[in-house]
Image (spheres, grey):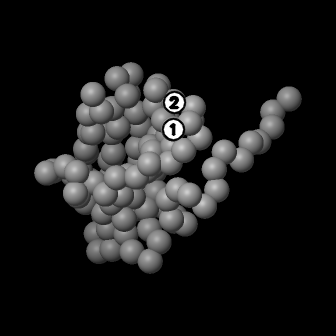
Amino acid sequence: VASWSLLAENDGPSARAGHAAAFAKNQVLWIFGGKDEAVLSDIWLFHEAAKAWTSSGIAEVFSAAPSARKEHVAVTDGNGDLWIHGGQDDTAFLSNLWKLSTN
């Protein structure tokens, strides 16, 4: 029988809409972007084994990174890399494709 389990509350990403999430083979859930009061470019990781969130301001960590966006798609591949495509910022639709190599 299927059942829900609450894994975390109030210690992770801000309340938001239009973000993308992808679960990687290393048991980490990646969340990128979305919108609260502004369009976001942050990355949050939920580590299932530790039941804990960590965050990274992508602009501070990487020299090249996707711009802030909402309504995009994300997937992880067999290597655990995160792929992000499309979405929109506050003024335009986006058609670029980004890959975050995690190794």
Residue that sits furthest to the bottom in the current view: 37
Q: Are marks 1 and 2 in contact (CB under 8 Å)?
A: yes
- Which of label 1 and label 2 is nearer to you? 1
Q: In the rendered view, would you say 89 is above or below 6?
A: below
Q: Is residue 36 left or right of residue 61?
A: right
Q: Tell me where residue 49 sits by quadrant.
A: top right
**Is residue 8 found left or right of 38 in the rendered image?**
right
Q: Nearer the viewer, residue 50 or 38?
A: 50
- Image spot of residue 37 (x, y percent): 44, 77
Q: Residue furthest right?
A: 1
Please say if 82 is above or below 71: above
Would residue 72 appear left or right of 68 to someone viewing this image?
A: right
- Circle 2 is placed at which residue position? 27
Quadrant of image for the N terminus:
top right
The quadrant of the picture occupied by the C terminus is top left
Residue 14 in percent (x, y) is at 51, 65
Query: Which amino acid type corresponds to the residue marked 1 in the rendered image?
Result: His
In percent of width and height, residue 8 lies at 63, 50
